Amino acid sequence: MHTAAVVGTGLIGTSIALALTGRGVTTHIIDRDPESLRLAVARGAGTPEPPPAPVDIAVIAVPPSAVARTLADHQKAELARVYTDVASVKALPHAEYLALGCDTTTVVGGHPLAGRERSGPLSARADLFHDRHWVLTPTPETGESTLNRALELVSLCGAVPVLLDAAAHDRAVALVSHLPHLMASLTAARLLDGEDFAVRLAGRGMRDVTRIAAGDAGLWADILAANAAAVGPLLAELTTDLRRTADALSLLTEAAPEQQDAALSDLTEILRRGSEGRARIATTHGGGGADAHALLSVAVGDQGRQLARLLDDVGEARVDLEGMVLPEAGAPAHASVGLRVAPDVARPLTDALRDRGWAVR
């Protein structure tokens, strides 16, 4: 791959452009918002000049509802030989490609499963996709060269490719991404009516649960609307559990002792299922077991002062260390420190430490 175009200079689009530019790919960036485009150019994401000939691949990095029309326009203008997108919903854009008469032999759907709470080109980073899953959703009409080019894009961005069909992808992200975002938003909205002293007491638990609620509301409304068919049933199941929980709590405050015992048992069962569900994530990421941890290597200079600052920054990131591996006696001053953490917090901690200037591997 020698040339690429990225249409859309938000967090994901600019991060892809930064990654490609960093790998020596001549990257043209396109956006209707001149300010966002200017910021992406200032970040070194690429050139705003139009390509003199069709590029090897164009990445459509716009909201789901705009993907198909954007693709159709750029196919008509012959922007690229191959196209992909990064929308977090895949079935709807493909159906719209067909309706608009797009050439689907040169298109493969894509979705990098990476992001940050902050949006826009200023939050972009070239390593955003390192070791993260990047789903591609080829169809029977997808050309072999199209898929191979998209796989090369994923590799250049340092991500791990996963091939799924569009419907399976949409069901998966409804469960692991879209529903959690919706629940974080609904929980955070309760804070609007909370008393000031109560909000001031909010600690790590509330911050962790509501962290992703800080995302762009307009973009997330677009995403949820595009994947309503998959999110709706999950929300209905959750509503049943919430009603069951509310009923149990009501009985615990008002019912006779024998009913309270049954309600407490029901509440315990609800919480137990949550604990078991959470354990499946740890098993998937780390193989399960008490010793399944990720080890991050952080370069330190003067170990006395730097180690204290590193631990302060870990604390600021609100991550609990499972252990630490210090350099052996006599190691050079620039040796690395190993931080042992739970697998599911390895990436957030890596991002937080890199934001604070640490070199993390």
Image: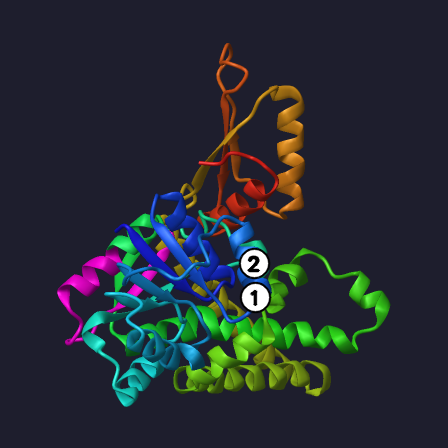
Residue 286 picture location, percent across and down: 38, 49
Q: On the rendered structure, is 245 left or right of 103?
A: right
* Any part of residue 2 in sight: yes
- Rendered image quadrant of residue 116: bottom right
Q: Report the front residue among 10 and 134.
A: 10
On residue 361, the disc is none
Does residue 187 lie above or below 3 as drawn?
A: below
Does residue 111 lie above or below 233 as drawn?
A: above
Residue at x 40%, y 71% (from the top left corner): 87
Q: On the rendered structure, is 69 left or right of 83?
A: right
| Residue 206 drawn in magenta | no
Residue 326 picture location, percent across and down: 52, 24
What residue is pinned by disc 2? 38
Q: Amino acid at mark 2?
A: Arg
Q: Amino acid at mark 1?
A: Pro
Does residue 170 lie above or below 96 as drawn?
A: above
How far separated are the C-alphas under marks 2 and 1?
6 Å
- Rendered image quadrant of residue 100: bottom left
- CB under 8 Å between callouts 2 and 1? yes
| Residue 133 drawn in magenta | yes
* Any part of residue 265 in sight: no
Residue 261 picture location, percent across and down: 60, 78
Helix, strand or loop at mark 1: helix
What residue is pinned by disc 1? 34
Helix, strand or loop at mark 2: helix
Q: On the rendered structure, is 216 left or right of 340?
A: right
What span is colored magenta in the figure? Answer: 132-151
Most distant residue in the bottom direction: 99
- Name the image quarter holding the C terminus: top left
Q: Residues within 10 Å of mark 2 (few under 14, many from 20)?
A: some
Residue 350 picture location, percent across and down: 51, 44
Does residue 87 lie above or below 359 as drawn?
A: below
